[in-house]
Amino acid sequence: MEKILDIKDLHVSFVTYGGEVQAVRGVNLELYKGETLAIVGESGCGKSVTANSIMKLIPSPPGKIKKGSIHFKGQDITKLSNKKVRKIRGVDISMIFQDPMTALNPTLTIGNQLTEGLKQHRNISSKQANDQAIEMLNLVGIPNPDERMKQYPHQFSGGMRQRIVIAMALICEPELLIADEPTTALDVTIQAQILQLFQKIQRETGVSIILITHDLGVVAKIANRIAVMYAGKVIETGTRQEIFYRPNHPYTQGLLNSVPRLDQKGEKLVPIVGTPPDLFSPPEGCPFTARCPKAMEVCSRVYPFQTELSDTHAVDCWLQDERAKKYIAST
Ligand SMILES: Nc1ncnc2c1ncn2[C@@H]1O[C@H](COP(=O)(O)OP(=O)(O)O)[C@@H](O)[C@H]1O
Ligand code: SF4
Ligand SMILES: [Mg+2]
């Protein structure tokens, strides 16, 4: 399979009055053509900062990509000029956020907003742009698209607005769609419908999707692969089956025990006690040590090596690493 995105050893910090927030600390991620990769983890673990780095949308100052590379179709985005990145943004890579209202202009009709991007980036007539916009609204499930094109954002419900935002993100046929908590602001029924829509879009357009969410339940049906983040690091990656049925990292296990699951009715939900570490001075060892029911002495001192459990499944935890014995023996 073709690899379209390759993030290596990404480090992103924010310099604030309180000190340097090390938001992303050595993230590695790969994305293959046509797959949905979910990035999950508690609030503040660095999901949005990772996603925004791909779009070169880190406000600087205070933010800075300190180290690492982000290769998109062979070129390193971190090294591109802002001008070149603007050509990629919205055309090759599109992003959607939690609140659809921020992405829509309340003073322009939906039709105008949908065709604007097309006319800007593609050399096509107004008629062609219009036809394509209607086709997109059809794809995302907006009834009577001809009529709806003439209406303004406030004339749509929250769920319909998010569908329009998705249509806007897809209209230039990007290769990569990044959705950052796209359903968090919506009620549960609408959430499910929007997730189904992502599945349909993937099937029909073949676009690669990065879906970011704090809710593991959301990705259960639609992710091909899952990356679990904790305190600025990816601590476990695997296929959906590996993460749901053979979770290895105690944090992933904790996450799974804290969300309702369709396949385990009646199981008691157990929240993970404690809070993630402060990212001003993150711990040297495993950042989960203070909350981990299986922590050993070595954990707080040395960050675990990555262990590959299968071709697709990798974990950063001393429990899986033979070398832990050596580290314990040497102390
Ligand atoms: N503009 C900013 N200035 C300072 N700190 C920031 C900024 N943006 C994000 N952070 C910090 O970076 C860390 C990761 O944030 P974020 O990626 O937004 O988390 P999430 O996983 O919830 O999306 C958090 O500690 C957050 O406070
Ligand atoms: S490395 Fe140690 S503290 Fe970290 S998750 Fe594994 S056992 Fe727990
Ligand atoms: Mg976020």
Image (cartoon, rainbow, N blue to C red):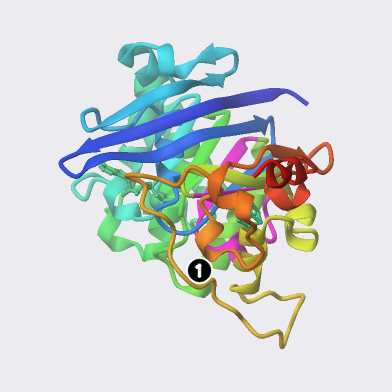
Q: Along the line of sight, which residue is nearer the eye, 1 or 165?
A: 1
Compared with 170, 315 (above or below) is below
**Residue 212 highlighted magenta (yes or no):** yes
Question: Which region is colored magenta?
Answer: 207-230
Q: Within the magenta stretch, is there residue 213?
A: yes
Decide if residue 272 is on the left or right side of residue 22. Answer: right
Q: Is residue 285 above or below residue 216?
A: above
> What amino acid does circle 1 point to?
Ile
In the rendered image, residue 29, in percent from the top left (x then y), is placed at 61, 33
Residue under pointer 1: 190
Task: State the quadrant of the N terminus.
Answer: top right
Residue 95: x %, y % from top left: 44, 39
At x 47% / y 36%, what residue is drawn? Answer: 25
Whether residue 179 is visible here, answered yes or no, is yes
Locate the C terminus and report the quarter of the image it occupies: top right
Q: Position of 219 compared to 80: left or right?
A: right
Question: Could you tell me which residue is drawn at 58 percent across and 28 percent down?
Answer: 175
Instruction: Say which quarter of the image contains residue 329.
Output: top right
Of residues 311 and 90, which is closer to you in this image? 311
Looking at the image, which is closer to me, 142 or 24? Answer: 24
The percent position of residue 77, horizontal first and vertical second, equals 46, 18
The one of 156 and 244 positioned closer to us in this rendering: 244
Residue 131 in sight here: no
Q: Residue furthest left?
A: 17
Q: Secondary structure at mark 1?
A: helix
Mark 1 closeness class: few <14, some 14–19, many ≥20 residues within 10 Å:
some
Q: Residue furthest bottom?
A: 266
Asked if residue 49 is positioned above or below residue 180 in the image, the reply reads: above
